[in-house]
Structure formats: structure tokens, C-alpha cells
Amino acid sequence: MNCPFCGAPLTSGQDRCVHCGSDVRTFRRIKNCAVICYNIGLEKAKVRDLSGAAEYLEKSLEYDKSNIMARNLLGLVYFEMDEVVKALREWVISKNLDPSAENLAGTYIDELQAHQSYLHEVDELTKRYNNALELAKQGNDDLAVIQLRRIFASNPRCIRSGQLLALLYLKHDERQKAEKVLRKILAADVNNTKALRYMQELKDLEESERDKDSDEPRVIDDAVPMKIKGGRFEDKPSIFVFLNLLIGIGVGLAIFAVLILPTIRQKQAQNANNAVANLSSQMTEKDAQITEKASEIDNLNEQISNLQGQIDTYEKDSKDTATAAEGLAGLLKAANAYASGEKELTVAEDLVSLDMTKVTDTNAQTLYKTLLAKTRDVAVAALYTQGVEQEYNNGSFQAALETFKKIISLQPDNLDAIYYCGRTEERLGDTSAAKTYYQQLIKDHAGTDQATKAQARLDALNGQ
Amino acid sequence: MIDYEKELEKFQPMKSVDQVEEAILSENLTDMTDLLQEILKEKDEK
């Protein structure tokens, strides 16, 4: 503590300043009052009497504005009552009066500044509260109540919003709701003056109603009117109550049928129409997609068939090429065999077995024909001589038959060989085979000598 | 009985965080010691 006149430090128990000689007893008393108020405020804050604490702490600062602890605690109390601006005000002043690091106000301010989102929320809450207050002052109590109820539900520490909400509930005689809100306020701030006053108002209203009830004349519930026996009017149970009930139900059903049901049906029909329209549009879309896909499939099938045709052509060409190559190779082999002196029969057999239809080269065809003419005719003549003279005439019919068949394989149109085949078969006893050869000659080579002879043999066989 | 309209007038809008500076400047920081000093000063002058 310093002397308020000269600023020199004062030691405890001194009534006068050693430096300037001023009487400091009154100042000591003032400082003591500030300390006492701070202690009471602290005690109240500890038991959550926030309003009471704030009152005493404000008083303490009125005695001594430099009471840093009282100011910091007041800031905390305001913060707990969701009065963030007031809290910040106290802490900023405190920090200004005592900039030392020990001053807790600096920590509080730093904490708040570190949580910008919280400050943003506080701002939003403030705007909503101010809006609700404005609505209430304009008479839009319903909207104000809705707004305040939301604020108080999301933040029960916002005592101001609770107080205003309770006041509006009281105004509209919603006592239970008002009581509920007031109890919440008093849970957060046990001696909140406004809340206590509103609670007292509630009690007064209830008491006045009770008094009003007691002033009314007593109704004797047990009193029962006497029945007059044989009288005109008898006490019968009233059917009007049931009639009224039935009429009420009927009217309700009629209103439902006339006003509500058509609307429901219309809405249902509209929904169904919308659903059908959606489905039909989807179906149209799907149909278009299907048509498109089908067209794509047709195109692809056409491409496949074209490619298959190309493949078939290539395969056929390759087969033809291979056949032609085989024919040429066989021709070369036969030519070599002929040049090296091989027997005409062997060369002719090789040549006859060749497929020269795919060979397009004219030189190769000429060579084939030349070789075939030179070898086959010689071979056939030799075989014929062998078959007739050496085998058939000597009774070697089986060997003769093989020889004649070989001639036919070399020269299918050799009529003598065919005839002798028939004759040989006849000699061997196979008349059926013999007839076949004879019929072949008669049918395919009519008018020839061999056909005439065959006819004679056939007649002879048939005549047996 | 509470007069609701008068009671409603007692409710004042809350200050937003932006108005802290204004709140600080409007704070009367005169305490009992300041008043006593003024009184003594006036007395000395007389």
C-alpha cells in the first residue's frame, strides 16, 4: 500500500505517512472495506451465488479500483454468467493497471483470444438475444419465446435469456414453464435477484388464486334433488350427451370426407401420376438405349460375318495354295523319277495320284500332261498285255482282276479293262460284280464294241 | 404484481465482442480514494 498523497510505501500500523506526514487512517479503512467486500464476494462465488458475488466485487472496486484480485474474480463471475464482454472489460482494465506477468487477467485474455470460434459463437448468441429482445419489445412474444428457448436450451449459462424467457412465460400465464426456467437459472446462480423476484411473483399468483377460491361460496356436492314420486318429470339419465357425442363424431367424419379426404386423394393421385410419368420417361429412355444397342449388335454381326467370309477365303486360298504346292512337289518328284529311269508304271501311278487342279502354272500343267502321256500309256499297254496274256489266258483270274483294276485306276475310261474286269469276275464266280461292270459299259459307253460285248455277256448271265 | 412492460424496459441489449473497447472506455474508474482525495484537495484550497 502506498501513500495516496505522495506515493511513498506505507508500513503496516502507521497512521501517518513517514514521507509526507499525511493522515492515512481513512485510506486504510477504505482499503479494508474493499478487502472485506472482496472476501464476501469470493465466498458467494464459491457457493455459485454469482449475482451476489458480482454485487460485492463491484462494491470492492468502488472502494479500491486497484484491487486486482477483486477485478479478476469479477471478470470470472461475469464469464460464468455468459457476460463475456463484461468479463473481458474487467480483465483488460486489470491488465492495464497491473501489467506484470503474475496478473492472471493476462492468462484469461490469452485463453479467450486463442479460442476465436468461441468468441464467434458468443457474438452469434448476442445477436440472437438482441433480436429476441427487439421482438419482445415489438410485441412479437411468440417469436421471441421461440428464439429465447433455443438460446437458453443451447446455453443455460446465458442467464439474461432465461430471465427474459421467464418474464414472457409469466406474461402469458404459462406458469409451469416459467417455473422450470427460473429453477434452471437459480441452479446456475442461486441468488439471482430477478429470478427470485419472478419466482415470488409466481407464488403470489398462486396464493391469490387460492384466496379467490376460498372466497367463493361452497358448493354442496352431496346435495341431491329430491324426487317427486308420480310427478310429471322423472330423473332419467340424459341421452343428449351421447347424442351430442354422436353428432360431433358425424360432423368430424363429414369434414374429413369433404375437405381432407379429397385433398389426400388428390395428392396421392398426383404422386402416382408423377411416378407413372417418371417410369414412362425411364422406359422410353431404356427403349432408346435397347434400340441403339440392337443396332450396334447388328453392325457387329455384319462385321463378324464379313470377317468370317474373309477368313474362309483366306483358308480356302491357303488350302488351294497348299494343294498346288503338293501337286508341284509330286510333279517334280515324278519328273525326277522318270529322268532317273524309273518304271513307267511307278511314275504313272505317282502322277495319277497327284491333284493338279489347283496348279495354275501352264508350264507345270504341260509338263504333267507330257509325263502322264509318256508313262501312263506305256504302263497301261504293258499292264493290259500282262493281264490278258499272262494272267487271264493262263487262268490266273485273281491276279488278272488286280491288274485290270490297276489299269482302271490309271485310266478310268479304259473300256477293255472294264470289260475284262467283268469277265474275270464272271470266271471267279462273282456274277453280281461282273454284271456291275457290264452295266457300266452299257450305260456309260453305249454304241461301243465293249458295250455290245457286255450286253451279250449280261444276256447270257441273265439267261442262265 | 410485475408490470411486464416496465420490466421489459429494464432488459438492455447485450454488447458484442467488438464493443469491448467501448465498454472499457465507458467504465467509471473513480473509487472512494479518488473521491476522498478530491474532498481533501478542495478543503485545502478553501
Image (cartoon, coloured by chain):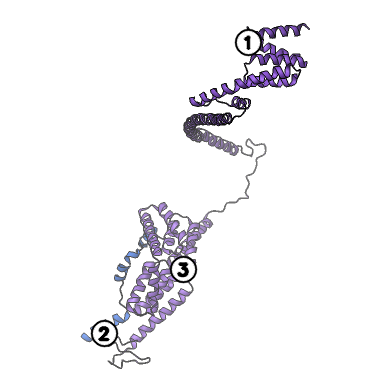
The structure residue drawn at horizontal position 31% and vertical position 87%, both measured from the top left corner, is A3
> Vertically, is A80 above or below A349?
below
Query: A459 or A312: nearer the eye?
Result: A459
Q: Earlier in the sequence, mark 3 or mark 1?
A: 3
> Vertically, is A174 above or below B15?
above
User: Which chain contains the residue that carries disc 3?
Assistant: A
In the displayed image of the protein, which residue is found farthest to the left?
B46
**Residue A77 sits in which quadrant?**
bottom left
User: Which chain contains the residue that carries disc 1?
Assistant: A
Mark yes or no: residue A430 visible.
Answer: no
Residue A339 in percent (x, y) is at 56, 30
Tell me the residue that label 1 is attached to. Answer: A445
Chain B representation colour: blue
> Quick check: marks 1 and 2 in contact, CB under 8 Å?
no
Marker disc for residue A189: 3
The structure residue drawn at horizontal position 30% and vertical position 67%, both measured from the top left corner, is B22
Mark 3 crowd level (few <14, some 14–19, many ≥20, 10 Å Cα): many
Amino acid type, residue under disc 3 in the picture: Asp
Amino acid type, residue under disc 1 in the picture: His
Measure the C-alpha gap from mark 1 to mark 2.
168 Å
The structure residue drawn at horizontal position 70% and vertical position 19%, both measured from the top left corner, is A387
Measure the C-alpha gap from mark 2 to mark 3.
41 Å
> Quick check: marks 2 and 3 in contact, CB under 8 Å?
no
Label 2: element kind: helix
Tell me the residue that label 2 is attached to. Answer: B40
Give the chain coloured purple.
Answer: A
> Quick check: marks 3 and 1 in contact, CB under 8 Å?
no
Instruction: Work out whether disc 3 and disc 1 sit on a shared chain.
Output: yes
Q: Nearer the viewer, mark 3 or mark 1?
A: 1
